């Protein structure tokens, strides 16, 4: 498959990128920084993209079967809440806007990596994706990001 992976340099993205490359997928990987070195045999195509500040690079979504969206800011009790809204909600909104703006079928599948904390803490497991969000921390920003996906999905 041809996959666009945002957040490919992060804690989760690094491992996922390695797995995807090992499984033989064609991966476009985003970063705001200089691309990290990769073994030549399994190098992704690195794309410079700040999802909050910059427009989607031309053709970045062309032919993508799926977008795996990991770019974001993980919880940090010392960080201001606005930082979560920007890195998680604004970035996700811009990504979805870029996909919607293409107006070409078929639209890629989008996988948004959220956090279990949108369901609150101490919830009985297992939870289903239809469980009602009840966040107690700034991870609520992720909840807003999630809800931003829902109406778009219904329109398809
Ligand atoms: N780690 C966990 O255990 C965990 C658990 C549940 C959910 N999550 C969620 O999963 C997401 C990723 O977590 P992580 O632990 O991998 O985070 P991380 O190690 O802090 O990495 C963050 C990633 O997001 C990218 N990024 C941040 N802001 C960006 C922007 N404006 N434009 C483009 N890329 C941006 C960074 O890319 P560059 O710096 O290279 O540009 C980096 O690749 C977060 O939203 C987090 O809340 C993480």
Image (cartoon, rainbow, N blue to C red):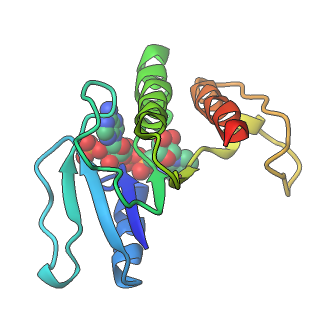
Residue in the foreground of this view, choosing between 35 and 147: 147
**Residue lying furthest right:** 124
Left or right of 13, for residue 75: right
- Residue 29 pos. (x, y %): 29, 57
Q: Residue at left 47%, top 55%? A: 68
Screen quadrant of the C terminus: top right
Residue in the foreground of this view, choosing between 40 and 78: 40
Quarter residue 151 falls in = top right
How many tags in the picture? 0
Q: Residue at left 52%, top 51%? A: 107
Quarter residue 98 falls in = top left
Screen quadrant of the N terminus: bottom left
Left or right of 40, for residue 47: right
Q: Is residue 30 above or below residue 144?
A: below
Q: Residue at left 36%, top 67%? A: 17
Q: Is residue 71 above or below residue 89?
A: below
Residue in the foreground of this view, choosing between 93 and 72: 93
- Residue 96 pos. (x, y %): 49, 36
- Residue 34 pos. (x, y %): 10, 49
Ligand 1's image quarter is top left
């Amino acid at each position: 498959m041809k996959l666009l992976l945002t957040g490919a340099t992060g804690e989760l993205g690094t491992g996922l990128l390695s797995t995807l490359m090992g499984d033989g997928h064609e991966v476009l990987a985003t970063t705001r920084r200089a691309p990290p070195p990769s073994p030549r045999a399994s190098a992704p195509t690195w794309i410079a993209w700040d999802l909050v500040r910059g427009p989607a690079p031309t053709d970045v979504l062309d032919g993508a079967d799926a977008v795996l969206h990991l770019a974001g800011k993980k919880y940090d009790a010392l960080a201001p809440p606005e930082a979560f809204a920007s890195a998680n909600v604004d970035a996700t909104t811009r990504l979805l806007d870029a996909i919607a703006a293409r107006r070409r079928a078929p639209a890629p599948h989008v996988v948004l990596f959220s956090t279990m904390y949108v369901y609150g803490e101490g919830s009985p497991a297992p939870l289903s994706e239809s469980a009602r969000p009840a966040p107690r921390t700034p991870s609520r920003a992720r909840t807003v990001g999630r809800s931003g996906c829902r109406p778009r999905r219904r329109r398809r």
